[in-house]
Amino acid sequence: MNFFILFLLLFSHSLCKSIRHSEIDSCDDTVNGIGIEWDGEDDKINSKFYKCYLKLPKTKLNYVNESCFSIDVPYHYCVSKKIIYSSSVPTSGSHRPNWPVYGEYLYCPPQRWLHALEHGAVVFLYDPCADEYEIEIFRSIAQKCLRRFILTPHSSLENDSLFTIVTYGCKLELTNLIGNEKIVTDYIKVSLQN
């Protein structure tokens, strides 16, 4: 057995483990070909997506931006097809047939978490260089507020935000979490009612 496949089977909790549907296993078995989701080989996850390489200066700016977009048609594509988005943080669109198991990940790509959004999950993205204390607050909000959530680092957040909460068709971007906790929880409550 390939060492990488064995590694995935034993330690898949840290990668984006997906719920599998037997009728689509041949096109997306959640193991083979998944390197296309992070522009790498299956056995070499590029750590640029989830590790901090350039510590960000502390910003005093308090940027908070909520935006909603028209829903893109959600086609399911097998892992043999590369999916490209017009935004580094898409809120809808094409994705893989299998969606991720809810929870926290070392890295979960948009091709997976977009499908979870379609099923009512909330995705919590944070810059890997964000303040550890604020990441812990972010984690706590996700775990205390929701059962269906994905929490993952994402090194390509937009508008210099360090935290982004994504719901189906919408997102909330923030540079600071401290002092904005109520904005985050209110956004989640409103989003889940729609």
Image: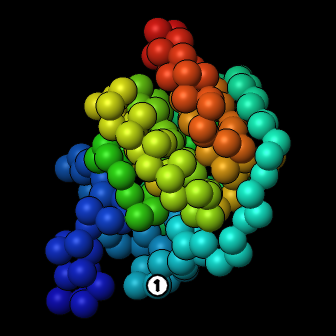
Can I make out residue 93 in this image?
Answer: no
Q: Residue at x 67, y 42 (%)?
A: 176
Farthest residue, direction top: 193
- Residue nearer the viewer, 44 or 147: 147
Using the image, determine if residue 84 lies above or below residue 32: above
User: Image check: 189 left or right of 126?
Assistant: left
**Residue 92 in the image, given as x and y percentages of width and height:** 60, 35
Q: Residue 11, located in which quarter of the rendered image?
A: bottom left
Q: Which residue is mark 1?
A: 44
- Residue nearer the viewer, 98 or 57: 57
Can I make out residue 51 in this image?
Answer: yes
**Residue 129 in the image, given as x and y percentages of width and height:** 62, 64
Q: Residue at x 42, y 34 (%)?
A: 141
**Residue 57 in the image, given as x and y percentages of width and height:** 77, 63
- Residue nearer the viewer, 38 or 26: 38
Q: Residue at x 50, y 22 (%)?
A: 185
Q: Amino acid at mark 1?
A: Lys
Q: For mark 1, give the secondary structure.
A: loop
Q: Residues within 10 Å of mark 1 (few under 14, many from 20)?
A: few
